[in-house]
Amino acid sequence: MKATWQGVTLAESQDTVVVEGNHYFPAESLHMEYFQPSDKHTVCPWKGTASYYTVRVDGQENPDAAWYYPDPKDAAAQIRGRVAFWKGVQVTE
């Protein structure tokens, strides 16, 4: 699987975990030069508290376009150390 935005590959891995239709990529598969931590946090009742990254490519920003659960609840343990995407980031095979 590959996550791209603005023609740039943000992450690529054959080891994604799909939860609620979203592919969660291993953190080590991310090209971290395109990610900046965000102050945004949301809470999912069964996964826990999510943190976000803003994606920046060639001076363009996509705020909070990637999220992860630093300490997921037990029911979502399989996404620990993984990152998912939205807001126009394309995830393809």
Image (cartoon, helix red, strand yellow):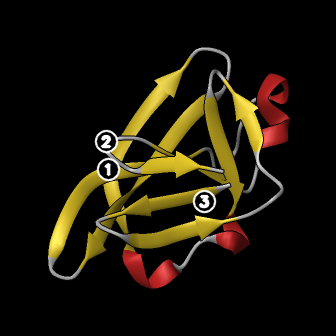
Q: Tag 2 or tag 3, which sits nearer the N-term?
A: 3
Mark 3: few, some, or many residues within 10 Å (few <14, many ≥20)? some
Q: Are marks 1 and 3 in contact (CB under 8 Å)?
A: no
Q: Amino acid at mark 1?
A: Asp
Residue at mark 1 to residue at mark 3: CA–CA distance: 18 Å
- Give the vertical position of 74 relative to 38 (above or below): above
Please report the residue visible at 15 percent of the width from the left and 71 percent of the height from the top. Answer: 60
Across and down, in percent, residue 27 comes to 68, 65
Considering depth in this image, is 50 or 14 the residue closer to the camera?
14
Which residue is at a point 33% across and 65% down the rendered structure image? 55
Determine the residue located farthest toward the front in the rendered image: 93
- Foreground mark, 1 or 2, reads 2
Mark 2, other Cα within 10 Å: few <14 / some 14–19 / many ≥20: few
Residue 29 found in image quarter: bottom right
Q: Residue furthest top?
A: 45
Which of the marked residues, 1 or 3, is nearer the chain's N terminus? 3
Q: Pointer 2: what residue?
A: 87
Q: Is residue 29 left or right of residue 56?
A: right
Q: Which kind of residue does numbered mark 3 sit on?
A: Lys
Residue 47, picture quadrant = top right
Give the residue displayed 57% in from the left and 49% down from the top: 92
Vertical comparison of 56 with 68: above or below: below
| Distance between the alpha carbons at the discs numbered 3 and 2 | 15 Å
The residue drawn where x is 65% and y is 66% is 12
